Image: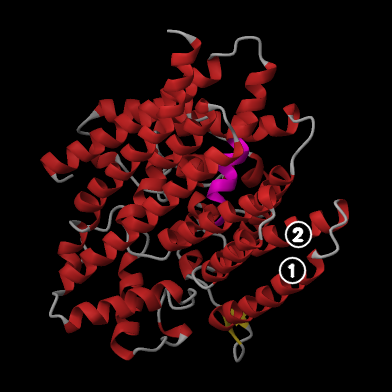
Amino acid sequence: MTTKNKNSLFILLPVVLLALGIVVRLIYAGYFGSESYKNYDHYTVFQYTHDSIYHIEYIQSVAEHLSLPAVEKGLEYPQQPFYYILAGILYRFLNFLYFSEEEILTVIVWLSALFSIGTLVFAYLLSKKVTEQGWVQSFIVGLMAFTPAFIYQAGMIGNDPLCTFLSAGAFYFLVRYIQDEKIKYFITAVSLATLASFTKISSGTIFLMILFALIYKYFYKNQKQLLKMIFVVFAIGFMCLGVMLYRAYLPWSGKFRFVESYTYEHQKTEPGRLSYFLTFNYPKLAEEGQSFVFGNKDVARTLPTFLYGSFLFGEYSFTNITDNYPFIKALMQFIILTGLLFPIGIIANFFYVKKWTLIDYVSIFGIGINLITLISFLIKYSAVCNSDFRYFCPVFLGLLLVSAMGLSRLNESSKIKFILPAITLILISSEFCWVIERLAVRIFTQI
């Protein structure tokens, strides 16, 4: 194959991955999302969702009363309101049209699928803006397209899909503003960041990333006109912070109110021990093939291990599948092996980057802030599920970007140029095969 043909292949590949990722999400929403809620009355099939019962109750409360419920009345009620207002209004409208409860919940699942597809589109657009290397673009698009933990959002009822979509959009337009310095990109980034902060409290990270970019340009590029923009972001950020605290803080009790998973004994971790934050028990994770929240303690009770495992497969148990189909577990173990490309890429950025760009600085800054927030949250509210990788949803694209560019720079420094691109394609292909196998098992056996 000639060099020209190889280049054409890599140019086409990200588009193919984008299209396949969209198809996979549509099929997944049909067979895991809407199907799951057919037994809603019995709450029996919420295997691959996060507290959907309580998210549904929040939505129904908004739909019934056209107002937000009191924070202390339900498990998810301290959550930011934007998603529940959207879903609640949709629920009330469909109920007015005499849709059944099952049909309404199905529509809300498809709404999550659209948000997940939108996130994937932003990943594709970002990849085209930050690099011309086809295999690096494929890494960003492929991991977002087929990594199971990202696909799950297409079939769930909850605020994570909307938060991820808005955060991804805000990050993409922030990158466009850094590159082109057009005010329309800045306004769009701030607008999406505002909506994201009204969706999930952790999305405040996006505002800090925008501020970081503006302050960097002001001091290091001497762009004095940025002072007004910095003031605007500060003002909007404080306004959003006020709304966020209003939902999560109970002045009369003097306490912040969060989802109280940390009160369950089987969720308790030991964040007081330094080993909890520094131990990466990869052999045990590879043996298990998953990072089930109630599973092996050597996996669930160390932060790096559980973060990496939940990045790939979420915090769920797949034993009901792998016991019947051992080859699926073998494929999961292989993905856990080749998926090491992701953390390797992040680490490589610190060793192989001679000069970081502002996009690099903003991405690393956002990831760092998100990590510090997560760790402080775990120290205060120690629970296994609070260490799930989905808590990084405000910086998903930033993480993929940092890892991809780190691999690119590592590849440029290596003598054998084809190894990392080859492993990248193997990882993406393996994830795609796993998703297809998982869907096939669901379609033909309902497991």
For the point 21% across and 58% down, the residue is 36
The answer to which of 27 and 160 lies nearer the viewer is 27
For the point 50% across and 44% down, the residue is 125
Q: Secondary structure at mark 1?
A: helix
Label 2, label 1: how many angstroms apart (C-alpha)?
8 Å
At label 1, counting other C-alpha atoms closer than 10 Å, the crowd grade (few under 14, some 14-19, many 20 or more) is some
Please state which amino acid type lies under the numbered disc 2: Leu
- Left or right: residue 338 versus residue 249 is left
Reading the image, the residue beneath label 2 is 214
- Quadrant in the rendering for residue 215: bottom right
Which quadrant is home to the N terminus? top left
How far from the left and from the top, in percent, is residue 365? 71, 51
- Left or right: residue 406 versus residue 114 is right
Range of magenta residues: 394-403
Residue 273 visible in image: no
Task: Judge whether residue 233 is colored magenta.
Answer: no
Q: Are marks 2 and 1 in contact (CB under 8 Å)?
A: yes
- Quadrant in the rendering for residue 131: top right
At label 2, counting other C-alpha atoms closer than 10 Å, the crowd grade (few under 14, some 14-19, many 20 or more) is some
Reading the image, the residue beneath label 1 is 229
Q: Earlier in the sequence, mark 2 or mark 1?
A: 2
- Left or right: residue 434 versus residue 217 is left
Q: Where 432 sits versus 160, above or below? A: above
Task: Judge whether residue 399 is colored magenta.
Answer: yes
The answer to which of 352 and 290 lies nearer the viewer is 352
How far from the left and from the top, in percent, is residue 26? 26, 49
How far from the left and from the top, in percent, is residue 304? 58, 42
